[in-house]
Image (cartoon, helix red, strand yellow):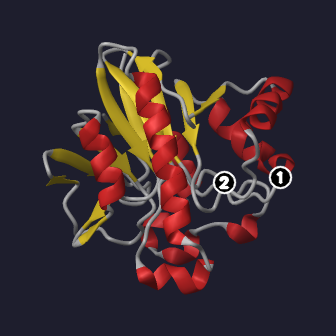
Amino acid sequence: MSVFYIADLHLSENDPEKKMDVFGGRWKDYTNKTVRNWSDTVKAEDTVVIGGDFSWAMSLDQAYPDFALINKLPGRKILLEGNHDFYWQSLKKMTQFCLENGFRYEFLRNNAYKCGDVVICGSRGWYTDEREIPETLADSAKIIARETARLKASLESGSKYDKEKVVFMHFPPVFGAYKCEEFIDVMLSYGVRRCYYGHIHGKYDVPPKTNCMGIDFYYGAADYLSFKPLLV
């Protein structure tokens, strides 16, 4: 049994106008690339952590075709929230939506999942680049405090297993010269040595892995991975 990670699928089966093809050659026919590469890579007994920005839909009803598409693919699916997942609601509503429609998804928030030799932990995170604040009008300090608490809760939940805790996020705690020390400090306090993230697009000349303070950070945005899930 293997664990894979891929973020930023940006599916839009319900609204073709929202597709990502306009953002460069790698995005051309990206939905079919995702389905083909996932099917060729992932086995039924494997687990795929989907690292946020799963769908462009604004509601769960609109997201139905995207959930249905990925539900047909092999493997266990664990989904965490991204900044564009506007359909996302309470875990109770998300779980009920999946039950009503026969979808097999699990959701990563304030919890952890044991998968073979690793424990899957994580949170959405946040990216404090000052260039993003005018666009989002977000209170970064408040959001980071909340997401840090969620990461702590997830790692605490995972601590009951005597396995390596691996963190999965949407936003990068480290990218180039950028570093969010709040998330790094939490990971260090729980002995985390690997973290996977997405969110960043169009940066194809950066290394797939960097190390900061003893933690390896892996870049897993779908376009960077050429829409092939990354083996953890």
Q: Position of residue 65 (x, y in %)?
A: 77, 45
Amino acid type indicated by mark 1? Gln
Q: Quadrant of the C terminus?
A: top left
- Circle 2 sits in a helix, a strand or a loop, which is it? loop
Q: 220 left or right of 205?
A: right
State left or right for residue 52 relative to residue 40. right
Q: Nearer the viewer, residue 26 or 201?
A: 201
Placement of 144 over or under 201, stated as above or below: above
Q: Which residue is mark 1?
A: 62
Name the residue at 71% across, 40% down.
67
Q: Is residue 4 left or right of residue 61?
A: left
- Residue 144 appears in view: yes
Q: Quadrant of the N terminus?
A: top left
Q: Looking at the picture, does residue 94 appear above or below residue 6?
A: above
Pointer 1 and pointer 2: residues touching (CB < 8 Å)? yes
To which residue does mark 2 refer? Answer: 55
Q: Quadrant of residue 22?
A: bottom right
In the image, residue 185 sits, relative to residue 174, either above or below, namely: above
Please indicate, yes or no, whether residue 8 appears anywhere in the rendered image: no
Q: Which mark is residue 213?
A: none
Mark 1 and mark 2 lie on one chain; the one further toward the N terminus is: 2
Towards the viewer: 201 or 153: 153
| Residue at screen point 78% across, 32% down | 92
Circle 2 residues within 10 Å: few <14, some 14–19, many ≥20: many
Question: What x and y, as percent, mark residue 216?
Answer: 20, 46
Mark 1 residue element: helix
